[in-house]
Amino acid sequence: MSNNQIQLVCPSCETATLFNVHTGQAQNNTVCPKCKKAFVAWPVRVRAKNSRQDKRANTRAYSVRVIDVNGGQHLIEFQQKGIADFELRAGDQAVFSYVNNKLLMVQNLTVGRHLNLKSGCSVMTLIICGIVLLLLISICALASLLKTHL
């Protein structure tokens, strides 16, 4: 079994670092040197990808058939926020990175792109929260002014 150095993006802090990946080993346990978080990197070759968007939910669902380093074929299904498509083509080299058995990062090594699947607030959610916060501050300020004038 030999080692190859591959530039991976940490699924926790999104720092790109060269990691030693063991060829002939389906999954590699790695630790990010920056944030010290452990994750599992699964290098594969893409056989086929299908994706479909849901504009109402603002999501895209993927079904990706892959071949691991031992020749085993697998189906990986996942969903992302937003409807933009992530490029994965037949023959592309990819790495699926997991933290606590949850897929958090997909990297297409062939084209040098990555897709972060961490759940978090969308931009629209942040805007709505900001507006609600401003309304609450305004109501409190008005209530304070009315209280002092009465």
Image (cartoon, helix red, strand yellow):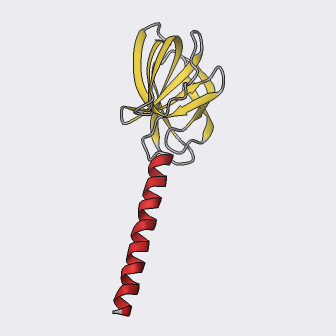
As drawn, the residue found furthest toward the front would be: 150
- In x, y percent, where is residue 38? 45, 40
Quadrant position of residue 60: top left
- In x, y percent, where is residue 69? 50, 13
- In x, y percent, where is residue 13? 53, 45
Query: Does residue 28 appear to the left or right of 92 in the view shown?
Result: left
Query: Does residue 56 appear to the left or right of 90 in the view shown?
Result: left
- In x, y percent, where is residue 61? 43, 24
Above or below: residue 48 compared with residue 53:
above
Above or below: residue 65 compared with residue 56:
above
Residue displayed at 40% across by 21% down? 77
Depth order, front residue of 134/32: 134
Depth order, front residue of 79/128: 128
Q: Quadrant of the N terminus?
A: top right
Q: How many marks?
A: 0
Above or below: residue 72 compared with residue 12:
above
Depth order, front residue of 88/3: 88
Residue displayed at 34% across by 88% down? 147
Residue displayed at 56% across by 27% down? 107
Q: Quadrant of the C terminus?
A: bottom left
Query: Does residue 115 appear to the left or right of 140 in the view shown?
Result: right
Residue displayed at 40% across by 79% down? 142
